[in-house]
Image (cartoon, rainbow, N blue to C red):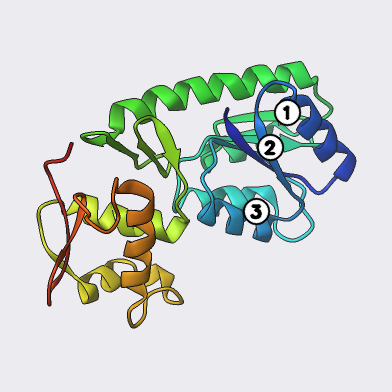
Amino acid sequence: MPSILIIEDDREQSQMLSDYLSGEHMEIITCPTGIDGLTLLRDEPFDALILDVGLPDIDGFEVCRQVRTFSQLPILMLTARGDAMDRIIGLEIGADDYLPKPFNPRELLARLRAILRRTQHTHQSSALRFGRLEIHPDAHAVYLDGEMINLTGYQFDLLSVLVNHAGRVMSRDQLMDALKGHELESFDRSIDVHISRIRGQIEDDPKKPRRILTIRGTGYVFARQQD
């Protein structure tokens, strides 16, 4: 069941889309502002974003620009404006598709399914596989035995650093330096807390980890060879 975030300040429009797409076997989360939407996107895994251009705080173009600094999540932009230049700008800054209002919900569904199919193919080809564990960098998604693992954005980034240095011991200082964009998270022993939470999601037995190993007095290492 695809998880879709809708950033739309028009409550009636948002509710209509939520009801319609939920009826098409999609999990829908709605948000009325760009700032709150960006927070959700950094902390929760989604399969696609439906993004209105006209938001009350920052416009959809700015949301799209910021999303593209940390994710390749599929974006379908909506606008009440019919200016062709808006469509060009949206696509140039990273939107996958663009739909002017008013629109037929069936057309939106068709476009949404199309970009989900395209990105699913891309993500499958770029996936990193370690035994039963799969990491999809573009989608910010992790799967164990085919089931999606629920990690926060910070935890995904921490796991990604370890994976990208698989077989190499990373000290806490090195990990915090690699995650310096998360200043509020990276301090003292917070790395240990997040490692423990990640293990709780990806290890068969978190007390006897086989994927993220502790090197006593040094740091952590992501094991290359796994079941």
Q: Which of marks 2 and 3 is nearer the N terminus?
A: 2
Q: Is mark 3 on a helix, strand or loop?
A: helix
Q: Can residue 82 be seen in this view?
A: no
- Which tag, 3 or 1, sits closer to the chain's start? 1
Query: Quarter of the image holding residue 140?
Result: top left
Res. 147 in view: yes
Q: Position of residue 74 (x, y in %)?
A: 53, 35
Whether label 1 touches label 2, CB < 8 Å:
yes
Q: Tag 2's secondary structure?
A: strand
Category of crowding for the residue at label 3, using alpha-carbon neighbours closer than 10 angstroms: few (below 14), some (14–19), many (at least 20): many
Which structural element holds mark 1? helix
For the residues carrying marks 3 and 1, which lies nearer the camera in this image?
1
Which-is-in-front pick, marks 2 and 3?
2
What distance separates the C-alpha of mark 1 from that of mark 2? 6 Å
**Residue to which mark 2 is pinned:** 28
Q: State the separation of the CA atoms marked 2 and 3.
A: 13 Å
Query: In front: 72, or 39?
Result: 39
Write the residue at 85% across / 45% down: 10
Please state which amino acid type lies under the numbered disc 2: Ile
Residue type pointed to by label 1? Ser
Name the mark on residue 37.
Answer: 3
Amino acid under disc 3: Gly
- Residue 115 is drawn in which quadrant? top right
- Disc 2 crowd, CA 10 A, few/some/many (<14, 14-19, 20+): some
According to the picture, the residue beneath numbered tag 1 turns out to be 22
Residue 32 image offset from top left, x and y in percent:
77, 52
Residue at 12%, 45% (x, y): give it: 224
Q: Residue 1, how many percent across, how many down?
A: 58, 27
Using the image as rendered, state which of residue 119 and residue 89 is in the foreground.
Answer: 119
